Amino acid sequence: MAPADPELRELVREMNRSVLASRFGKKEGIPLQPEGEIFPSSVLPVLAVNKAGEQRVFPMKWGFSGPKGLLINARAETAAEKATFREAWKAHRCVIPASWYFEWEHDEKKKAGQKYALRPEEQGLIWLAGLYRMEEGLPVFVVLTRPADESIAWMHDRMPVMLPRSGIGEWIRPESDPDNALKTCITRVLWERAG
């Protein structure tokens, strides 16, 4: 996520105007101005529906608390079945906007090598499908992943679930079928060396 993108910059501003932003600021002790590369436990602008069913931008922290540490991803193929993600899969879906996502090439021994920046072939923001829940009165999210497209499987065996802009509303509405919404996910990406 890099607020150089005007649309992303506006989403950050909207996030910072929310009541939750001040609560996060007090609890986390950090300003909510995400820039550059984002890491787990960062607080980001996330799209979800409010209690009235309207799409809004909320600050959410990246990662569910788990018994062995922070859970940052959920497999799209099994999230509906896993106790940790089942309720969020049914009714608490969200979308995380970003300019790029980063991946590291791994060798057969799972040793990280070259870092790459990836984005969909279409220009504009990436819309990552996610799930959220409340922890200690504040929302937290995970990013859904799927098997990597064959064009980047040499780099990594998984990739985030990316939605077209037109699929955001269907994904975040609690009454919609998440499996149906995922049928529109984007798989083809462009990549370049990073770092």
Image: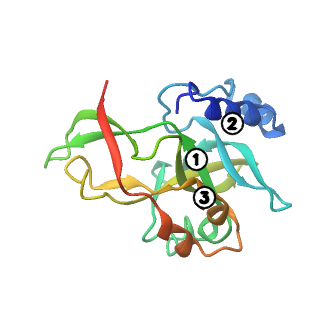
Q: Which residue is mark 3?
A: 166
Determine if residue 66 is in view: no
For label 3, the SS is helix
In the picture, measured across the screen, residue 127 lies left or right of residue 24, that is: left
Q: Nearer the viewer, residue 66 or 156?
A: 156
Q: What's the CA distance linking mark 1 and mark 2? A: 10 Å
Disc number at residue 156? none
Residue plotted at (67% across, 49% down): 47
Q: Amino acid at mark 2?
A: Leu
For label 1, the SS is strand
Question: Which colouring convention does the figure follow?
Answer: rainbow
Mark 2 vs mark 3, foreground winner is: 3
Q: Residue 176: which quarter of the image?
A: bottom right
Q: Which residue is mark 1?
A: 96
Percent from the top left, x then y, of residue 162?
Answer: 48, 54
Percent from the top left, x then y, of residue 62?
Answer: 56, 43
| Label 1 with label 2: CB-CB less than 8 Å | no
Q: Amino acid at mark 1?
A: Ile
Percent from the top left, x then y, of residue 187?
Answer: 38, 57
Q: Which residue is mark 2?
A: 11
Q: What's the CA distance linking mark 2 and mark 3? A: 17 Å
Residue plotted at (65% across, 45% down): 46
In the picture, measured across the screen, residue 117 lies left or right of residue 134, that is: left
Percent from the top left, x then y, of residue 73?
Answer: 46, 53
Determine if residue 121 is in view: yes
Q: Check disc 3: other Cα within 10 Å, few if <14, some if 14-19, many if 20+.
A: few
